[in-house]
């Protein structure tokens, strides 16, 4: 499994899963985020600027893109 640092908003595949580099919580756009009341279907890059990890409160900059199985 490889990671890509997420250091600034940019075009990401809307279905890209992002993992917190602090606590390993995974943000899955297909599921959204119940803690922040983010509905399913919201991509990571479309999250509010003040969104933080619902598990450990890490900022968005600590999240890394999980490589898709298709990436090889």
Image: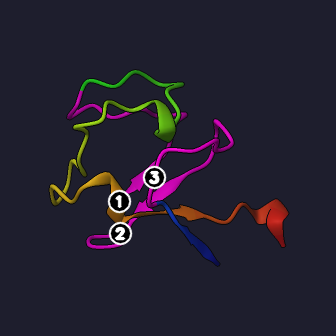
Q: Is residue 37 above or below residue 30?
A: above
Label 1 residue SS: helix
Of tags 1 and 3, which is closer to the observer? 3
Give the image location of residue 14, x and y in percent. Answer: 64, 36
Give the image location of residue 45, x and y in percent. Answer: 49, 38
Residue 8 lies in the magenta-colored region: yes
Residue 11 lies in the magenta-colored region: yes
Q: How far apart are marks 1 and 2 (CA)?
A: 13 Å
Q: Is residue 12 above or below residue 7?
A: above
In the rendered image, the quadrant that contains the N terminus is: bottom right
Would residue 36 be visible to someone looking at this image? yes
Q: Residues within 10 Å of mark 2 (few under 14, many from 20)?
A: some
Q: In which quarter of the image is residue 71?
A: bottom right
The residue indicated by pointer 1 is 61
Query: Looking at the rendered structure, which numbered label has been put on residue 24?
Result: 2
In the rendered image, the quadrant that contains the C terminus is: bottom right
The residue indicated by pointer 3 is 8
Give the image location of residue 13, x and y in percent. Answer: 69, 42
Q: In this view, does 62 lie above or below 1?
A: above
Horizontal side of residue 55 vs 19, given as left or right: left
Disc 3 or 2, which lies upstream in sequence? 3
Residue at left offset 64%, top offset 44%: 12
Give the image location of residue 47, x and y in percent. Answer: 39, 32
Q: Do the residues labelled 1 and 2 touch (CB within 8 Å)?
A: no
Residue at left offset 32%, top offset 30%: 48
Disc 1 or 3, which lies upstream in sequence? 3
From which residue to which does the magenta span run?
7-36
Horizontal side of residue 38 vs 59, given as left or right: right
């Amino acid at each position: 499994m490889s990671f890509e640092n997420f250091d600034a908003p940019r075009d990401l595949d809307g279905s890209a899963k992002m993992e917190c580099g602090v606590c390993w919580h995974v943000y899955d756009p297909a599921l959204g985020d119940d803690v922040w009341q983010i509905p399913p279907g919201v991509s990571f890059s479309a999250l509010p600027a003040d969104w933080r990890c619902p598990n450990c409160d890490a900022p968005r900059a600590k999240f890394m893109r999980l490589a898709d199985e298709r990436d090889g």
